[in-house]
Structures are given as C-alpha cells and as structure tokens.
Image: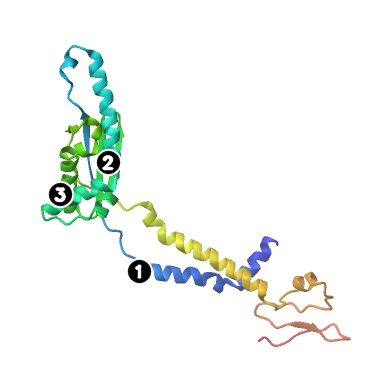
Amino acid sequence: MELRRYWTILRRYWLLALIPAALVLALGLATWRPAPTVYNAGVRFIVGQPPGAAAAEFDEQRYYNWLTSEYVVNGLTDWIRGGRFAAAVSARLAAQGIDAPPGLIQGGLAVDNARSMLTVSLTMADSDLLQQVLAGVVAVLTEDNAAALPQLGGQRAVLTQLDEPVVNPIAPGIRSQLDLPLRVALALLAGLGLALLAHYIDPTVRDRAELERLRLPVLGEIPRERGEGSRFQVPGSREERSSPGP
C-alpha cells in the first residue's frame, strides 16, 4: 500500500485514531501526582582483622590478614543482602520504639564491596526514618556480625567507619517523567491500528481505485469538488452545468 493511501485512510478515520490517545492523556492528567521526594545516605567501612603477635615478625602473616579481610567483606556483603540482616535491624529499632518493618529496610538497602572496603547505602522517602534506620544498620553491622561469620570462630570482624552518612534528596528519575508521554504514544499507535482496522472492515466503496482492485468495470466517475456540486454535461450540447451543492 502506498503512503498516499495510508494518508487517505488517516484523514478519513482521524477521529478514531485520536480517541485512545485523548482518553489516556485526559486520564493521566486527571490522576497525575508529583513524584515524592526520595532520600539517600551511605557510609563506607574498611573491614579487617587485627594482626596476631606473629605479624610483627613475619610479613607473610600480614598478607594473610589482608587476604582474610577481603573474604570477610564478601561474607558481610552476602549477609546484608539477606533477609536476616534486615530482620535484625528491625528488631533493634523496635526495641528503641521505632517501627521499621524488615521488608522496608531490605527494599531500601544497597551494598557494594571492593577488596577490603564495604559501602552500604539506604534509600527511603522519610529522611528522619532514614537516619534512624541507617544508625541501626551501622550498629548491627559493627556489633552483631560474629554470628554471620562462623569462619572467624565467634570473633567479631573489625569495621572502621570512614565517613559520617549525609542525607541527600534524589531527583525523580527519567522514567517517571516519561511515563505519561510513553502511554500517550502507545495509545496513539493503538488508535492508528483501530483506524486501519476500521478501513479494513468498512464495506463502503469510496473511490475508483477500490473498484479497480475488485476488478469491477468503471463506467463513469463523478468527481467531488470542495464547495461545488457535481458537474455534468447535457447530451447533445457543449454547455456544462452544475448541480446544486449539498
């Protein structure tokens, strides 16, 4: 089908093509709410074990201390990502009268590690609750990590906090900004599909090309002109007349 044919179909069914997009746009504007402000804070730790007495005499012992620190960081990372860590933080906060369900804590936690450095960040919509929960995260991480690391034989891993957490607001993501335009665009595509479907099931013959595609003989054609009636010629004369317009 030629592009000109598509344009003719869209001109004929333009209202049907625009109705879905108009409905989605109206509904989106009626239910639109600004995205809530989200806050984030993070803290970094250096993780390690204190060297033994033999480390002062053998450099090899210091090397194994550094290597052990990397394994400890990996173990702590897996612990933080699990549900038990969030449950432990929630229980500690509940003892302080702070309501923070484990699901809320685990959903906002993010952790990363590189060699002996551990980075923990927390994202929440309430800045005050964020500070309280992050304080609980730091307390559980530094004080209750022995149970998560049985390889240390009941000893607690040593975590040195490198910086104080700073709460920062996070701007709404591009996804929330493009949500309505994308829905309108999809509705417009659906409207175009409806227009083509309406043309496909419409039995009306509107021009000569449609008859020719049906292999029907065309005896004559009365052109349609904007603002004028149909023209015809009286038999036996050359006078051209016009029928009154609609």
User: Of circles 3 and 1, which is in front?
Assistant: 3
Crowd tier of the residue under label 1, counting other residues whose Cα lies within 10 Å: few below 14, some 14–19, many 20 or above: few
Instruction: Identify the residue at horizontal 60%, vertical 70% (top origin).
Output: 195
Which mark, by number, is residue 31?
1
The earlier-in-sequence mark between 3 and 1 is 1
Which quarter of the image is occupied by the C terminus? bottom right
Query: Element type at marker 3?
Result: helix
C-alpha gap between disc 2 and disc 1: 41 Å
Picture quadrant where residue 198 is located: bottom right
Q: Residue at x 57, y 71 (%)?
A: 14
Label whose residue precedes the other's in the sequence (2 or 1)? 1
Q: Amino acid at mark 3?
A: Arg
In this view, the mark in front (2 or 1) = 2
The answer to the question of whether label 2 and label 1 lie on touching residues, with beta carbons closer than 8 A, is no
Cα separation, mark 2 vs mark 3, equals 16 Å
Q: Secondary structure at mark 2?
A: helix
On screen, residue 180 above or below 218: above
Seen from this angle, which residue lies furthest right?
236
How far across and how far down the image is residue 67, in percent? 28, 24
Q: Which mark is residue 241?
A: none
213 shown above or below 106: below
Amino acid type of the residue tagged 2 in the rendering:
Trp
Q: Position of residue 112 (x, y in %)?
A: 30, 38
Identify the element where label 1 is drawn.
Answer: helix
Q: Earlier in the sequence, mark 2 or mark 3?
A: 2
Task: Give percent across and percent down for residue 165.
Answer: 18, 41
Residue at the outermost left position: 96
Cα–Cα span, label 3 and label 1: 39 Å
In the image, residue 139 above or below residue 93? above
Asked if residue 39 shows in the view, the reply is no
Residue that numbered label 3 is attached to: 92
